[in-house]
Each structure stands twice: as C-alpha cells, then as structure tokens.
Image: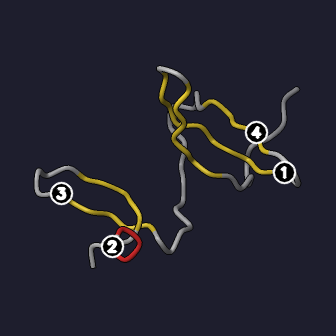
Amino acid sequence: MVSSANGVRGYLIWVVDGLRSRHVFRVYNADTFTDYEIHHSNLQIIIDDEDAEFYISSGGRCVLDHSEKTLGIE
C-alpha cells in the first residue's frame, strides 16, 4: 500500500531498539501509532514546538533541544 505523506503531521523521535538506535517518523492515530523508517534523503521539516531551541555548546556543537526552562538551566 502506498499513500502520500505530504501534509501528514507526526513526530521525529529517537528510538532505541536493542542495540540499534535511530530516528523514526511517528504518526499517531486515534488509539495507536505507526513508526515509519526514514529513507528519504532530503526531507524538509518545519519545527512547530515552542519548547524547542538551538544551542551552540562550549565545544562548538550545534544542538537542537528543549528550552532552557524545561532543561532547568535558566
């Protein structure tokens, strides 16, 4: 079965499955969810989360994480 993913709202999440860790695209339904493996090589995303902030660490790493308030580092 093939259906368009264009316009579908979901979540990019990090899952740990045994020794394998990876990002998946999770789509919630009424009482369940489906995790899709990501094979797309150039997928545009828009961050729609007021709790998300970009940081540059002291080591120069660029990081996307929760807000300082959520992390308790205000």
Badge 2 amino acid: Gly
Q: Residue at x 13, y 52 (%)?
A: 60
Residue 29 placement (x, y as % from top left): 84, 51
Residue position for label 1: 29
Residue 55 placement (x, y as % from top left): 26, 63
Task: Give the secondary structure at mark 4.
Answer: strand
- Marks 3 and 4 sit apart, C-alpha to C-alpha, by 34 Å
Residue position for label 3: 57
Q: Is residue 9 left or right of residue 41?
A: right
- Cβ–Cβ under 8 Å for marks 4 and 1: yes
Residue position for label 2: 72
Badge 1 amino acid: Asn
The residue lying furthest to the top in this view is 19
Q: Residue at x 59, y 37 (%)?
A: 24
Residue position for label 4: 34
- Marks 2 and 3 sit apart, C-alpha to C-alpha, by 16 Å
Q: Is residue 55 left or right of residue 21?
A: left
For disc 1, the neighbor class at 10 Å (few under 14, some 14 to 19, many from 20) is few
* Labels 3 and 1: the sequence-earlier one: 1
Task: Give the secondary structure at mark 1.
Answer: loop
- Marks 2 and 4 sit apart, C-alpha to C-alpha, by 32 Å
* Labels 3 and 4: the sequence-earlier one: 4
Q: Which mark is residue 11?
A: none
